[in-house]
Image: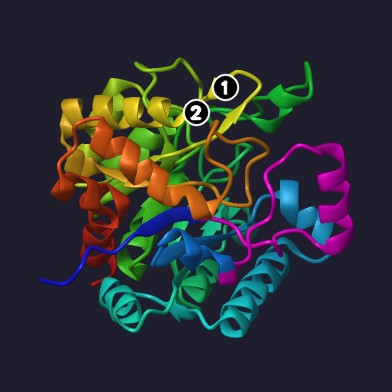
Amino acid sequence: MSPAVVVDTHTHATTMLPRFAAAAYHSVLRGRPPDVGLAEVPEGGVDAIVAKAVGDPIVTRWHLRSPFQAVQNQLSAIIDEAERSGARVVRTAADVRAAAADDVLAVILGLEGADCIGTDLGLLSQLAGDGLRVIVPVHLGDNQIGTTCLPWQKYVGPLPVRRQEIGLTAFGVEVVRAMNELGIVIDGSHADEPTLFGMVKHSSAPVICSHAGAQAVSSFERYLSDDAIQAVAGTDGVIGLWPYFMRGNGTPTLDAVAAHARHIADLVGAQHVCLGTDMNGVPGLAEGYRSEKDVPLIAKRLSMAGFSDTEVDGIMGENFLRVLEAVVG
């Protein structure tokens, strides 16, 4: 039997923002976690990552290009860094396993925020042709596809939040069906509950939430209700453990991360849990977890929380590979 593969289902490269914008971001958030380059990822025993460009205006406007070109620039930078670091850009679960067998980091291309496609499904098809295999349709703002659970405006004060009816739009339904046809994993992270339920209803393939948690464990808007957890599991999807913590929101410790895993597993089964660290994408992390090099500490906490070796292997990567194989082939 082949050894279990460790997969981080939600990461970002250090090239997400242009240098001038990244420098400004770093100066504002001086205590943020250090950037992690792709060459460092294997030091944490991670065999594969989903490296996501960001396609909503929070990032794309800084590239001073069209939103779609901004995403293409980010993807090109990910591919270039992968080549320089000796990693391999892959598309399928079989590709991931082959890279792991060769002791090479596998990089699956993804996108967080599909704002960049506008209402052009041809651009979605182009992304699929370029190798994208995971997309978060809705990120930090409502868009043409649906509505978000935590609009960016809530971080900066009493600004208008809603300008459209909540839930998956008619175009969003088309996007879900097109993603199914194109072999792209639908990642419902950040979507509000009506939008997520719409994705589940209209998808013929598993839906995931790559970086999330359980509201029953901690009442954070980004976490999922038990109904939402059951809906995602009902598609044979997975929900990612997310070691984010900032200003009282998220998982303050790795024990808290394990508590989310335990609740989800008790509710729908450990086969519906995965790992999504948000590497290079968050301003704060759980105590004791500082970078991708600490991924083994999450596995250790899961074992301490009573998960069997097989269950831990599933959470750390095998469960997501099951989804990837079902969606992509």
41 above or below 210? Answer: below
Query: Left or right: 249 with respect to 131?
Result: right
Asked if marks 1 and 2 touch (Cβ < 8 Å), the reply is yes
Q: Quadrant of residue 244?
A: top right
| Mark 1 surroundings: few (<14), some (14-19) or many (≥20) residues within 10 A | some
Q: Where is residue 202 in the image (x, y as percent from the top left)?
A: 29, 45
13 above or below 287? Answer: below
Position of the N terminus by quadrant: bottom left
**Residue at 20%, 32% in the rendered image:** 265
Query: Left or right: 268 with respect to 139?
Result: left
Query: Mark 2 sits on what residue?
Result: 222
293 above or below 156? Answer: below
First reached walking from the N terminus: tag 1 or tag 2? 2
Tell me if I can see residue 110 in this picture.
Answer: no
Query: Judging from the image, what secondary structure is the residue with disc 2 in?
Result: loop
Query: Judging from the image, what secondary structure is the residue with disc 1 in?
Result: strand
Q: Which amino acid does label 1 sit on?
A: Asn
Q: Where is residue 253 in the image (x, y as percent from the top left)?
A: 48, 27
Query: For residue 301: magenta?
Result: no
Q: Nearer the viewer, residue 215 or 307?
A: 307
**Residue at 58%, 36% in the rendered image:** 285
Region rendered in magenta: 11-39
Q: Position of residue 321 (x, y in %)?
A: 26, 62
Q: Disc 1 versus disc 2: distance between alpha carbons?
A: 9 Å
Q: Which amino acid does label 2 sit on?
A: Arg
The label shown at residue 249 is 1
Q: Which colour scheme is used?
A: rainbow
Query: For residue 24: magenta?
Result: yes
Q: Nearer the viewer, residue 297 or 70?
A: 297
| Mark 2 surroundings: few (<14), some (14-19) or many (≥20) residues within 10 A | many
**Residue at 26%, 63% in the rendered image:** 327
